[in-house]
Image (cartoon, grey):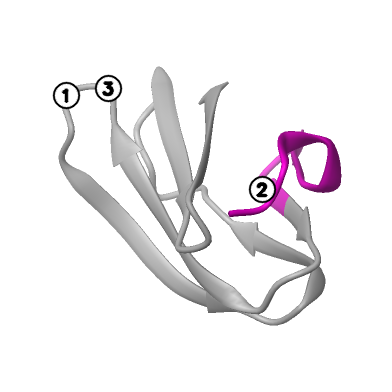
Amino acid sequence: MIPTAEMQVRIYGHLLSVDSPAAEQIAIYSAGGQLLYRVQKPAGQAAFEWNSLSRGVLIVRGSSRWMEKVVK
């Protein structure tokens, strides 16, 4: 499990940036738990377009067992 201090999720306009030391699978869920998007992330920072996702509270989870809530 990656400590929260070692990973960050940020929003830059239409991009969702995920920075963590591990190469891992990132999944984005609606507040109701529906899987909206899944992608493989390399180690370090990666940015993903998320224009197609609906507005509201989204849950971003990494396969290394971390989770962040973001508002789009």
On the image, the x and y values in percent for residue 32 come to 16, 24
Question: Range of the magenta residues?
Answer: 1-17
Q: Residue at x 34, y 59 (%)?
A: 37
Q: Quadrant of the N terminus?
A: bottom right
User: Residue 31, which numbered label?
Assistant: 3
Query: Left or right: 64 with respect to 6?
Result: left
Depth-wise, is mark 2 or mark 3 nearer the camera? 3
Q: Is disc 2 surrounded by few (<14), some (14 to 19) or many (20+) residues within 10 Å?
A: some
Please say if 42 is above or below 64: below
On the image, the x and y values in percent for residue 13 come to 75, 37
Q: Residue at x 70, y 72 (%)?
A: 22
> What residue did someone put label 2 on?
16
On the image, the x and y values in percent for residue 48 come to 63, 62
In this orientation, which residue lies closer to the viewer: 12 or 69?
Answer: 69
Q: Secondary structure at mark 1?
A: loop
Please say if 9 is above or below 43: above
> What residue did someone put label 1 on?
32
Q: Quadrant of the C terminus?
A: top right
In the rendered structure, which amino acid carries the disc numbered 1?
Answer: Gly
How far separated are the C-alphas under marks 2 and 3? 17 Å
In the rendered structure, which amino acid carries the disc numbered 2?
Answer: Leu
**Pointer 2 or 3: first along the chain:** 2
Q: Secondary structure at mark 3?
A: loop
How far separated are the C-alphas under marks 3 and 1? 4 Å
How far separated are the C-alphas under marks 2 and 1? 20 Å
Please say if 24 is above or below 58: below
On the image, the x and y values in percent for residue 58 come to 41, 29
Callout 2–callout 3 Cβ contact below 8 Å:
no
Depth-wise, is mark 2 or mark 1 nearer the camera? 1
